[in-house]
Amino acid sequence: MHICYVIPGDLSLSRYGSAEVRRREAVLQGWAFVGTRVTATDVQNGIGSIESSYDELRAAPAGIERIREIERGDVDAAIMGCFGDPGLEAAREMISMPVIGPGEASLLLAAQLGHRIGIVAVFDRLAAMHRGQAFRAGVLEKLCSVRGVDIPVLDLANAPEATFDRLVEVGRAALERDGAEVLILGCMSMAFLDVADRLSDVLGVPVVNPAKAALKAAESLVSMRISHSRRGRC
């Protein structure tokens, strides 16, 4: 099977360059099952990072069009490369193959792992957006908190150990103050730090990596030869 990870922005034009796109592709390939081919692409005329609902609206059209383009090739499923799942429902209206949103996939997985979910987000101000995702995924009752690390997306990898310490601090607050039983890393740049297992060991609870959750959801749907329902969509 062939799964394509579509970054709905110009990551290649950021200070990390196209090497970061290739690095993320390699990380995903390392997580994939034998027999799965993973490719990664970003989109032209996008934005460097997504940190608000406005950014999501700006990024969605180009991301959807890129997925429509790759569907004409040999791709079996696409992953939207942003935790906010920009344009996910619209993409599913236009595209027949499975389109996976990392935010949705993470929330559904976390709901199987515990009764109270905490999202470690980029900023506190994204709480309303993430609650909306939980509502659409049908797990809002389980979402107990959204706490931000207050580090911009493109700065998360600048000082990995400092970022990890902040993830521990915010994650522990979600556990001790909000009663979370399972945590989600609420950003794809956090996901590609590949620290979920280490964070889980430190905090003693499951920590969901959204990139890995999305990949495994895509592999599962393709292997079962099913996709999202067309009923109720245009």
Image: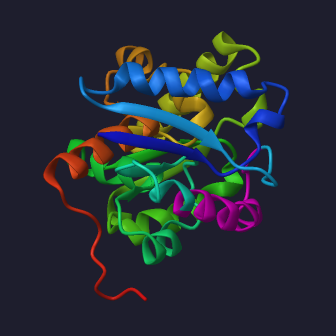
> Is residue 184 positioned above or below 204 on the image?
below
Residue at 78% across / 53% down in the picture?
A: 46
**Residue 163 horizontal/vertical position (percent):** 66, 20
Q: Is residue 50 above or below residue 194?
A: below
Indicate left or right for 88 with 107 as reference: right
Q: Is residue 93 above or below residue 41?
A: below
Q: Residue at x 67, y 50 (%)?
A: 124
Q: Is residue 119 something that shows in the picture?
A: yes
Q: Main secondary structure of the magenta part?
A: helix
Q: Quadrant of the N terminus?
A: top left
Span colored in magenta: 49-68
- Check the picture and name the quadrant holding the C terminus: bottom left
- Dividing the picture into quadrants, the one containing residue 24 is top right
Q: Residue furthest left?
A: 224
Residue 12: in magenta span: no
- Residue 22's quadrant in the figure? top right
Q: Residue furthest front?
A: 73
Rendering coords of residue 207 (x, y %) = 38, 31
Left or right position of 55 against 176: right
Residue 117: where, in percent of width, then height? 37, 48
| Vertical arrangement, residue 175 with respect to residue 103, above or below | above
Residue at image position (66%, 35%) is 149
Whether residue 180 appears in this view of the structure is no
Q: Residue furthest top?
A: 161
Residue 59, magenta (yes or no): yes
Q: Position of residue 168 (x, y in %)?
A: 53, 22
Instruction: Looking at the picture, tell me which residue is in the foreground, 111 or 69.
Output: 69
Q: Nearer the viewer, residue 58 or 19?
A: 19
